[in-house]
Image: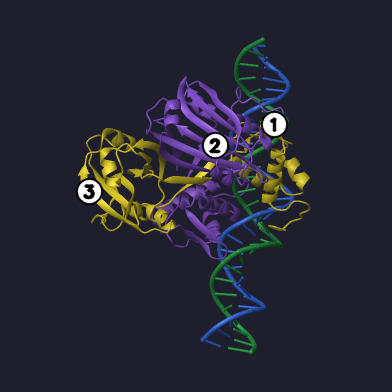
Chain colours: A purple, B yellow, C green, D blue
Amino acid sequence: MTGAGGKASGSRGWEDIRAEVLRRIRAREWAPGAQIPIEEELAAEFGVARATVNRALRDLAEAGVLERRRKAGTRVAALPVRKATLEIPVIRQEIEARGQVHSFQVLKQAFMEPPVPVASRLGLPPGIKLLYLETLHLADGKPFAFETRWLNSEILPRPMPDFQSLSANEWLVSHVAYVTGDIALSAEGASPREAAVLGVTPGTALFVTERMTWTADSPITFVRLAHGPGYRVQMLV
Amino acid sequence: MTGAGGKASGSRGWEDIRAEVLRRIRAREWAPGAQIPIEEELAAEFGVARATVNRALRDLAEAGVLERRRKAGTRVAALPVRKATLEIPVIRQEIEARGQVHSFQVLKQAFMEPPVPVASRLGLPPGIKLLYLETLHLADGKPFAFETRWLNSEILPRPMPDFQSLSANEWLVSHVAYVTGDIALSAEGASPREAAVLGVTPGTALFVTERMTWTADSPITFVRLAHGPGYRVQMLV
DNA sequence: GGCCATAATATGTCTGCACATAATATCCCA
DNA sequence: TGGGATATTATGTGCAGACATATTATGGCC
């Protein structure tokens, strides 16, 4: 058997169950919107415990293929929301994964009042000062991404980390671990400043990611990354 | 109790266990890279079954917070790969979710040989003909996204669906359910054709998504969506 | 000392049972 | 007939025990 310690007959582990359910959905034996048999029936049919069926169906529900509700049963999603998982590595890893060498330059570092939109999205009162950093990330010495970051200095230890030698990005992931946040992706024309830093002509289409992160109690940072031409984000569905 | 039928003492369900583990990680009681106690010890400590601890730790591992290997044990991810989940709705839903009205125009429909890169990425021999569709999606009558699609006509029923009245997008999700695929996101300057169709000036930064989808046996479709200025993709971490 | 077979170990999964919970169906009474 | 209390039901979660699997650690052999 694939997994464990019971009987087994035709199908084996929960992944086999999942595969078979998926096959029936694809083959339209179970049409979109239709209800599928209850866990007990499936367990009996496949000759496994209900927990095993539950594991398989739960997995498909997480993937958006099934919709489950107590008492109401399980049905095939009518308009399935496809979900893709994006893995957001640290920039250094991203560059090294391409076989290139990562380096960076801190172009600016100062305590400043953030623009109102940044402060309000971080949930901070206006007038408070944050650490502002401008960093250029290079891959094999060529501009890769331009980072502008507002950082809540409350969370920094003293003495403050030296962001000239360790990027704020990496300091944060390894010292303020496991925050929540949101990400926005967009396309924007390069501003004159961005164009100059990245070595492109103003107006060039840049791939921009903006991230806001916070812990339960306090806001951490707002980052904007402007990626040079040719940057692509790949995801598997 | 939160969940079920056993003893219980301090902590209750697997979500409480997960929360407590996460708290210890955030509090640096368990540092990044460090190994955490084995499931049995945690189960004893929390007064739950090992399966419950397993559920909690598995969930954190899926989220990228923990790294688990048989025999090697469980450790806190040193450089956590943050994972964000992107939900890809059908365009109509996306527009309607903004409170706007969706409509679309099919600008072109023809059987053609696809460009070599498209054919090869779909795993098709050169020279085969595919259905090519150009569609402009509108939100409240204003250009929203320009869709160019190559569609494997083998999978279409005859008579062919009328893509003038039902977008290929929606026909596919409800008739060729649950395919796998990949997605690429990028920023590109508008080509003259795209600029004309979307009503912007050439070179304007467009947010481009390209999707390739296939079933186990055969390729389905390649779509490129060029979104007008201001388009943003939001994700939660 | 180096290498391969073997033991040890932590996680992965399954069974069978039980109770919890949420949501729907049903029934009863005004 | 309407509406609220109650029964029913499918999923959600838990427990204990067991076996499976992947790795790592160990030991013996040459």
Amino acid type at mark 2: Val
Tag 3 residue: B109
Dot 1 and dot 3 within a common chain: yes
- Dot 2 falls on which chain? A
Query: Which residue is painted at 36% across and 59% down in the image?
Result: B101
| Residue B107 image position (x, y, % from top left) | 24, 49
| Badge 1 vs badge 3, beta-carbon distance below 8 Å | no
Task: Name the element at disc 3.
Answer: strand
Query: Which residue is painted at 54% across and 40% down in the image?
Result: A211
Query: Which residue is painted at 47% across and 53% down in the image?
Result: A65
| Badge 2 vs badge 1, beta-carbon distance below 8 Å | no
Res A10 seen here: no
| Residue A85 image position (x, y, % from top left) | 50, 42
* Mark seen at residue A223: 2
Q: Quadrant of the C terminus of chain A?
A: top left
Task: Name the element at disc 1.
Answer: loop
Residue B188: quadrant of the picture: top left
Query: Which residue is painted at 71% across and 31% down in the image?
Result: A157
Q: Quadrant of the N terminus of chain A?
A: top right
Looking at the image, tell me whether mark 1 or mark 3 is earlier in sequence order: 1
Amino acid type at mark 3: Gln
**Label 1 crowding class (10 Å Cα cut-off): few <14, some 14-19, many 20+?**
some
Disc 2 versus disc 1: nearer the observer: 2
Q: CA distance from mark 3 to mark 2?
A: 43 Å
Disc 1 versus disc 3: nearer the observer: 3
Tag 1 residue: B34
Between A123 and A144, the one nearer to me in the picture: A123
